[in-house]
Image (cartoon, grey):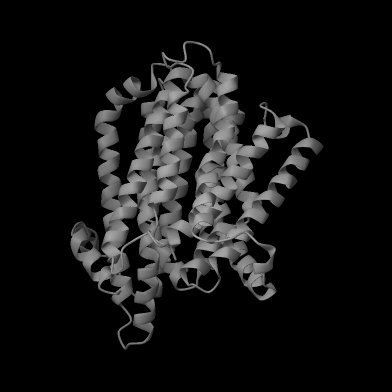
Amino acid sequence: MYKTVYKTGTSFKEKLLSGIVWRAINVFAAFVFNALLVRQIGATATGSFFYLLNNLFFAVLLLSMGIESGISFYNARKEISVSFLFSVGIIWSIAASIIFFIIIHLFDEQLLQLKHGYVFLTLYVFGSMLNSFLSAIYFTNHNSKAPNLTATLTNIILILLLPGMPWINGSLDFESYVLIYLAAALLSPLVLAFKLLQNKFVFSFSVFKTDSVKPLLLFSFHSFIIGLLFNLLKRSDYWLVNKWCSVTEAGNYFQASKVMQLLLLLPALASFSLYPLIVQSIKKDENSSEQTQTSTKVTKLIGMYFFIAVLLGLAITVFGYWVFPLLYGTTFSNLYLTTLFLIPGLIFFAATYPLTVFFSGKNQNMITIIFLSISIAVLVVCNIILTPKYYIYGASISNSLANFVFFILLLRRFLSQNKLSFKISHFTNALNGKEIFKSLVNLK
């Protein structure tokens, strides 16, 4: 699809490693930006800022309706032209942004606690939505460099413009910086769109075909439900924390959650890259007399994800007490203990990635939807019971309990469906990640 994406004959291993490297660079830039930002503005302002971004995140999620998943699916299968998907992304982003602009005018700004202007909020929603659509095209063409590089450059620009930087010299206040942050969401999608146009993928109404729109929308809606439930499990407690905790406490909790989300970015990317291989493995099982090859590999992957998350959790436990104050400042006095309560949730949630990929590859997404719904109910009930009394620590415990329930439900169904019994050897053998990777790559 792209003339300069990869040389002919580039192996899957090279593509996967390239994607991980560029994603790691992007994650590092995001981490540095986050650390510098919260250190400058403190826990109280952090609480308000991240609460605003959380509301905008769900606005983008609802308005996108999972279109990025449909774009990824059909572009990976090469069943719909890139020009068509490009056009869908632009038209949908414009239409959804207009709807968002109208809604926040019809209702009071306090509905989402938005205080920074209709235009900039709409620009952020438009830019975030279009970026996810266009990035889906790049990623499914094995081009991780362009979207991650533009995101990294955006973070670098935002770092350079931070109000506390010496070269800014007090000429920019935080309120103005928030407007710059919202507008910066346009930078990456504009670059990605320009690159697509350079590669002769045109935006045009003439490329539309009715028989392509319907399956794209149906697949996207199904993925949207799963994505919505996933993010409700990861983020819906923000509203409950905001209700029962002070702004400073909320800032500590939101930052602890941000740390967890950054740590989960790499396993999420790995799962996205492994998805086509798991699907191929499932098809191979269906066409042969042996039905346990994929389940064995997935079992080892579960253990590998689990142990990697354990190592990350141990690193945070050992070094976080000293590192967090240096990175984020003294106003985040509750950050370390809050993070400790969230670490079990990180470990169990990371271990669910191979399971959800497996059920998706089997076209059994309804299993994931049901178990996500149950886990969200657990999250809400536990928060109602614990958060008013134990505040952000109660919210952290609730988060870990909900993730544990989600993991156990998925694992139990996986073992039952594949007639497997739980063996600790599956987890200990999982440390041999090289063997797992080679067995998956050989499917190509």
**Rendered residue at 51%/25% (across/down):** 46
Toward the viewer: 338 or 325?
Answer: 325
Q: Is residue 294 left or right of residue 392?
A: left
From this view, report whether residue 108 is shown above or below residue 57: above
Residue 195, x across and y down, in percent: 49, 52
From this view, report whether residue 397 is shown above or below residue 443: above
Toward the viewer: 143 or 435?
Answer: 143
Residue 348, x across and y down, in percent: 37, 50
Q: How many numbered callouts?
A: 0
**Rendered residue at 37%/59% (across/down):** 5
Toward the viewer: 244 or 113?
Answer: 113
Asked whether residue 347 appears in the rendered view, the answer is: no
**Rendered residue at 66%/55% (across/down):** 92
- Quadrant in the picture for residue 167: top left
Q: Is residue 296 left or right of residue 355?
A: left
Q: Residue furthest right?
A: 106
From this view, report whether residue 283 is shown above or below residue 276: below
Q: Residue furthest top?
A: 170
Residue 249, x across and y down, in percent: 50, 24
Position of the C terminus, as image quadrant, is bottom left
**Rendered residue at 37%/35% (across/down):** 29
Asked whether residue 426 appears in the rendered view, the answer is: yes
Residue 133, x across and y down, in percent: 55, 54
Position of the N terminus, as image quadrant, is bottom left
Q: Is residue 80 left or right of residue 316?
A: right
